[in-house]
Amino acid sequence: MREISTNRITETIKRLCIEANCKLPIDMKTCIEKSREAETFPTAQGILDKIIENYNIAEKETKPICQDTGAACIFVNIGQDVHINGNLTEAINEGVRQGYRDGFLRKSIVSDPLERVNTNDNTPAMIYYDIVEGDKIEITLAPKGFGSENMSRIKMLKPSDGVKGVIDFVVETVEKAGSNPCPPIVVGVGIGGTFDKCAYLAKKALLRDADSANPIPYYAELEDTLLTKINALGIGPQGFGGKTTALAVNIETMPTHIAGLPVAVNINCHVTRHVKEVI
Amino acid sequence: MEIKIELPLTQDKVKALKAGDSCLLSGVMFTGRDAAHKRLFELIKEGKELPVNIKNSTFYFVGPTPKREGEAIGSAGPTTSYRMDAYSPSLIALGQTGMIGKGTRSDEVIKAMKAYGAVYFGAIGGCGALLSKCIKKCEVVAYEDLGTEAIHRLEVEDFPVVVVIDSEGNNLYKTGREAYLESLGEEK
Ligand code: SF4
């Protein structure tokens, strides 16, 4: 059994909150810069230039890239040979509390969905635990803005709807979202599982690098097909027209029931933030 | 070419602006998002006095991050505007002439904009660090208890926006997309 202290976890989470919100990951930067080169529409080119200027300023000044510093979505893979001395969830929330306070990040969480009183420290974090082999803890922190989260959808398709049903639903979701989620967007797609697992897959898909491909060739191809179809819509950066509506489509799948074909689409924006650290 | 505009946005300025125009705004505007709009709306319904003067005002839908020492404001990009759709027509009827946000607006909002004369501007979503450079002063004028959602008075200089919907109801989200798709046809 390897011992890991809750202090170490708090310290790590705090640091990751600030880093994720002020420094756009390299995969996103590369993707945005490539899209800028491929963009043909002048208005769209101008907006992509501003987006690039913005994340450069943010990184230089350690200032949030976007004012919506998100709900702190934290994926924790815990090695089964790790022992944590204390309350892990509390240690994570303490890290969020400190990170959002000391990093001058916005507190965007309300304690009750209907009463809507701000908790003023951005807790609780949205935590996703998984138990894995080994004696390490892998933490991925992905602050999630809600302008794009609000444009996400899930549908329980019929097995007979097949791949065409999946494509239509994803493209329709992006078209309906239009200018709202700050295009260019990143599209996370979950296929399979149950109603809730499917939504989880879509969120998890957003953790993958924007320039990565699904390891299964069939789904890698489907990612390309979807990206091409989405970028033929013409919505463009900010919805002002252009080629660059989406920067990437990432698909995650899992087995499902004989009667079902769940599909979930989790939309993210050009400020798709994710940092990973292994303790 | 960018059009320089001094706020307040009076009717003559409203009428001159067309969807697609790039503008640089200077002067005073107010911030407001979900919670502040809800409170303003309730006061209007009850016929009570509002904490800010709405006539010819411009509202920026934003909830900034906290500022550091020496800064006027933290990151401050637009939030999605449709969440204000339920409240905007009442404010427009009271003389609000400018709104800055991102994303689509409802038919009711556009109808009010045409009837009373108002403009909906888009600022670039996700560019909060860049946009904050154009905000020179920021102070809370109402609902301090709402934190980031309080109404702040902003002094801005050359704040970059694009006219998305003008006072005649022309909509850049439609025309921009069409123009791009047409430009593809021309290439072929
Ligand atoms: S959708 Fe993304 S870029 Fe737009 S405001 Fe939200 S977090 Fe920022």
Image (cartoon, coloured by chain):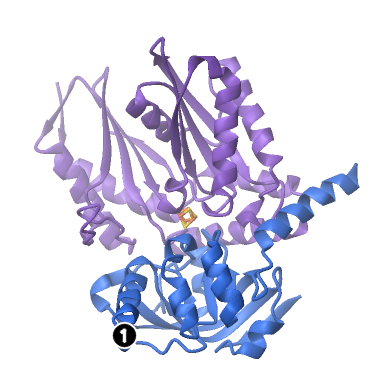
* Mark 1 residue CB less than 8 A from any atom of ligand 1: no
Q: Nearer the viewer, residue A132 or B13?
A: B13
Query: Which one of the lettered chains is coloured blue?
Result: B
How many tags in the picture?
1
Left or right of A202 in this view: A50: right
Left or right of A53 in this view: A242: right
Q: Position of residue B72 (x, y in %)?
A: 41, 79
Q: Quadrant of residue A257?
A: top left
Query: Mark 1 highlights which residue?
Result: B47
Q: Would residue B58 be seen by someone viewing this image from the given angle?
A: no
Residue at 41% in and 77% down: B71
Q: Is residue A118 above or below residue B148?
A: above
Q: Is residue A15 above or below residue A157?
A: below
Q: Would residue A195 be seen by someone viewing this image from the given angle?
A: yes
Residue at 46% in and 59% down: A66
Q: Position of residue B86 (x, y in %)?
A: 42, 66
Residue at 32% in and 47% down: A72
Question: What color is chain A drawn in?
Answer: purple
Q: Is residue A183 above or below residue B78?
A: above
Circle 1 packing at 10 Å, graded few (<14), some (14-19), many (20+), is few
Which quadrant: the C terminus of chain A? top left
Q: Position of residue A216 (x, y in %)?
A: 54, 16
Left or right of A229 in this view: A168: left
Callout 1 secondary element: loop
Residue at 44% in and 86% down: B54
Which quadrant: the N terminus of chain A? top left
Amino acid of disc 1: Gly
Left or right of A95 in this view: B63: right
Q: Quadrant of residue B50?
A: bottom left
Residue farthest top in this picture: A258
Q: Is residue A46 above or below residue A96?
A: below
Q: Position of residue B147 (x, y in %)?
A: 28, 71
